[in-house]
Image: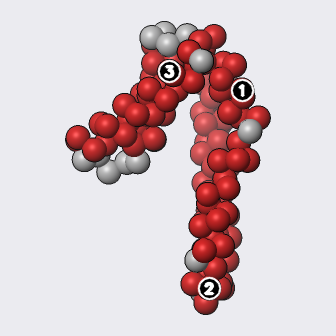
Amino acid sequence: MQGFAILLGFNMLGIALQQVAHVPLPGNVIGLILFTLSLFTGLVKLEWVESSSQFLLRHMLAFFVPYIVGIIAVWPLIQSALLQVAVSLIVSTLAGLLISGWVTTAMLKKKGAASRG
């Protein structure tokens, strides 16, 4: 239960900071960033949250149910623009893959040059 409390606390802290500071990021993303920083700095130990996070990862499909229901609810709107939605999904996926590949290649080349030099 301690792990769930820590995870929920960071989520709620992120939401509160977003509301108070009007940061243009979702509150749960802010909470995730704060949680990650806390893990890196040692403020939160991995052992404290590992079992809870593993449980959440095993049951991650349940977190997608609201999105699926939402898509079903607005399906007539999506269906009227299905070609545009499909093209944007394909283009954005390919762009993400190409940019990730380019950055990884550049980093590997830089690492290889640094290790030789």
Quarter occupied by residue 57: top right
Q: Earlier in the sequence, mark 3 or mark 1?
A: 3
Question: Residue at 74% of width from left, 39% of height from top?
Answer: 59
x%, y% of residue 62? 70, 47
Q: CA distance from mark 2 to mark 3?
A: 40 Å
Q: Secondary structure at mark 3?
A: helix
Secondary structure of residue under mark 1: helix
Quadrant of residue 103 within the rendered picture: top right
Residue behind mark 3: 6
**Earlier-in-chain disc, 2 versus 3:** 3
Give the residue at x 23% y 41%: 21
Residue flagged by tag 1: what amino acid is it?
Gln
Q: Quadrant of residue 49?
A: top right
Vertical order, 79 against 114 (above or below): below
Would you place residue 86 above or below residue 94 in this image? below
Q: Which residue is mark 2?
A: 76
Q: Is residue 99 above or below residue 40?
A: below
Circle 1 is placed at which residue position? 54
37 or 117: nearer the eye? 37
Measuring from the top left, give residue 92's x and y in whole percent.
60, 65
Amino acid beneath label 2: Pro
> Distance of mark 3 from mark 1, alpha carbons?
14 Å
Tell me which numbered mark, 1 or 2, is placed earlier along the sequence.
1
